[in-house]
Amino acid sequence: MNIVRMTLLGLSLVAGVGAYALVGQPEPAPRNGPIAAQPQTPNIETDDVLVATADLPAGRVLAEGDFTWLAWPAGTIQPGMIRRRAGGDPIGDMRGSYVRTPMSQGEPIRREKVIRAGRAGGYMAANLPPGMRAVAIPIDGQGIASAGGFILPNDRVDVVRIGRDDDTRTNDALGVQTIMTNIRVLAVGQNAQERMSERNTIGPTATLEVSPEQAEILVLAQRTGQLSLVLRPLSEAGAAARQTARDSALSIVRYGNVQVGR
């Protein structure tokens, strides 16, 4: 065996021993310690609740396509939400009911926001606060007596009466008097909801929320003159509603001249 072969054999042996040593060594541990196991996502208990499938305005009569079941975390279900686990026939109970308070798409349907079907009376009667009354007054279809038609449900208005002055001997004198202030509008025509897509609303009547005493004044005022609604700013919506028919001055218009009397 010559020197060249011996040299090649020695190099092969050295290379083989080195490769074995590398393969046989265990993998080094990471510098920051062993890799922590990923935490498992906990199983959250859910229950189906009834939610709106579209935006539901006040006064809408609910149909079956207006609501559906949606899985909801059981720990966040609030009282008033309608749960499937509670049993009964919630969908049947909701069908034909009135929406009392507007609801958004995907919002849970709460019992206090709905007037159940079969309840005595309709939406307007159920939506009136205790002690209040709803009185409709005629308005013109062009919006002349309702701020150009820009008065919408839930706006606040003053009620102004225009009529003949009974204290004068002539028939050419008109009296102008604000008989009520800051009165809430319940509906214009048959529209009892404010639609954001509509800039104005026209109808033959305006339904107002008043006290029993104010209702008597309105009914009488309709027989003795013409009523107009004056729109109030939103910033004054918190002011107390009041009647002024018995203590306010009466403006008398005679031949174009305005006189103030009592």
Image: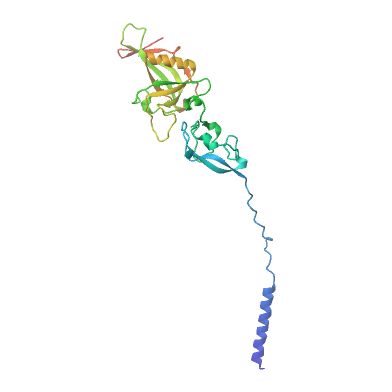
Task: State whether residue 159 is above or below residue 56.
Answer: above
Residue drawn 46% across the image and 16% down it: 214
Task: State whether residue 27 is above or below residue 212.
Answer: below
Q: Is residue 123 visible?
A: yes
Q: Nearer the viewer, residue 249 or 45?
A: 45
Q: Quadrant of the N terminus?
A: bottom right
Q: Quadrant of residue 89?
A: top right
The percent coordinates of residue 46 (x first, y second) are 60, 44
The percent coordinates of residue 31 (x first, y second) are 68, 62
Q: Quadrant of residue 141?
A: top left
Residue drawn 51% across the image and 41% down it: 68
Q: Nearer the viewer, residue 173 or 77?
A: 77
Q: Quadrant of residue 30?
A: bottom right
The percent coordinates of residue 210 (x first, y second) are 47, 20
**Number of callouts in the render?**
0
Q: Nearer the viewer, residue 162 or 106?
A: 106
Q: Is residue 175 visible?
A: no
Classify residue 111 as left or right of residue 199. right
Task: State whether residue 48 is above or below residue 41.
Answer: above
Q: Quadrant of the C terminus?
A: top left
